[in-house]
């Protein structure tokens, strides 16, 4: 060997099995790493699927509770209004009719409470499926009843028949002229026979067909060409509802509302317009 030549160091890991046991050990380590990577990927996927399932269950529970909250307030609102109407009825026939409607509202409340009980039982048993309740506010402060603006025309937009009818009866008892409908279009059809536009709009927030009371109010205001005073009734306590109402200039009331609260509010509105 030449004195100037350098001797190459042997490789740390042999290139072939014939060079020693290190090669086999390396292959074993590589295979173990591959298994670990595969297992890690599989466990990560399982965790993501579990998180997704848990999130879906949480959303389903939230949707059920929000729906139950809204649907429970509807018959409660109707019952409260029918009770207020009942106090103004003198004849037995009038009272019997209102009592029938009140009984229907109480039956709807009972059905919803049964649905909530079934949901709680399923939760206790570890169930994930939330039932879908299907049903036909703020605490009122007792205030002096202001005198109503006699004959003021009030458009009532409410898709729940019990709340709509009870509200119409109560407004009539107070000297107002309610025009009721399940949508803005139905109310406008009925208003064809009136020589003036509504003095006030009262609308439920959540209407049928995915429409909202805010949309109905905007529609009537646009056709009327003026900012008609408006009240939104809702069982939804989400803060964004209040923010949107303030931005649009609506008054937001949470169901169930009391008759004293509503009557006082109407008096203050007609005292300003």
Image: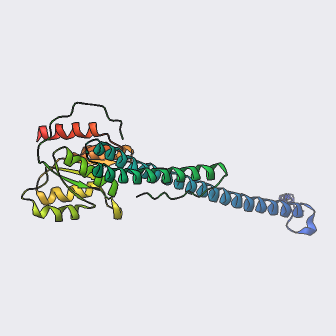
The N terminus sits in image quarter = bottom right
Q: Return the x and y of residue 234 as percentages of the image width and height.
A: 34, 48
The residue lying furthest to the front in this view is 92
Residue 183 visible in this rendered orientation of the protein: yes
Task: Tell me which residue sits at (26%, 40%) in the image.
Answer: 262
Task: Tell me which residue sits at (90%, 68%) in the image.
Answer: 17
Q: Return the x and y of residue 192 as percentages of the image width and height.
A: 12, 64
Image side of residue 203 versus residue 133, left or right: left
Picture quarter containing residue 225? bottom left
Task: Tell me which residue sits at (45%, 53%) in the image.
Answer: 107
User: 100 or 93, which lies in front?
Assistant: 93
Q: Return the x and y of residue 245 as percentages of the image width and height.
A: 27, 46
Residue 17, placed above or below residue 232: below
Image side of residue 223 versus residue 163, left or right: left
Picture quarter containing residue 143? top left
The C terminus sits in image quarter = top left
Numbered circles on residues, count? 0
The residue lying furthest to the left in this view is 195
Q: Return the x and y of residue 35 as percentages of the image width and height.
A: 78, 62
User: 271 or 230, which lies in front?
Assistant: 271
Residue 258, placed above or below residue 187: above
Residue 206 visible in this rendered orientation of the protein: no
User: 98 or 51, which lies in front?
Assistant: 98
Chosen colour scheme: rainbow
């Amino acid at each position: 060997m030449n004195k100037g030549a350098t001797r190459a160091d042997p490789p740390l890991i042999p290139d072939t099995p014939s060079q020693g046991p290190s090669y086999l050990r390396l292959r074993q380590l590589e295979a173990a790493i591959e298994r670990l990577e595969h297992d890690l990927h599989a466990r990560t996927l399982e965790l993501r699927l579990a998180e997704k399932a848990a999130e879906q269950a949480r959303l389903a529970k939230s949707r059920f509770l929000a729906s139950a909250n809204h649907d429970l307030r509807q018959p409660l609102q109707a019952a409260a209004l029918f009770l207020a109407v009942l106090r103004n009825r003198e004849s037995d026939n009038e009272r019997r009719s209102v009592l029938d409607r009140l009984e229907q509202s109480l039956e709807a409340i009972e059905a919803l409470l049964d649905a909530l009980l079934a949901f709680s039982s399923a939760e206790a048993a570890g169930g994930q499926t939330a039932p879908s309740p299907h049903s036909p506010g703020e605490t009122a402060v007792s205030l002096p009843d202001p005198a109503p603006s006699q004959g003021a025309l009030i458009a009532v937009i409410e898709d729940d028949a019990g709340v709509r009818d009870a509200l119409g009866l109560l407004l009539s008892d107070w000297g107002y002229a309610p025009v009721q409908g399940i949508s803005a279009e139905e109310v406008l059809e009925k208003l064809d026979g009136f020589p003036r536009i509504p003095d006030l709009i009262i609308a439920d927030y959540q209407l049928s067909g995915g429409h909202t009371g805010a949309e109905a109010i905007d529609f009537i205001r646009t056709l009327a060409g003026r900012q008609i005073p408006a009240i939104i009734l809702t069982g939804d306590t989400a803060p964004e509802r209040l923010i949107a109402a303030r931005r649009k200039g609506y008054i937001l009331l949470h169901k169930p509302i009391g008759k004293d609260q509503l009557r006082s509010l109407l008096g203050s509105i007609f005292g300003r317009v």
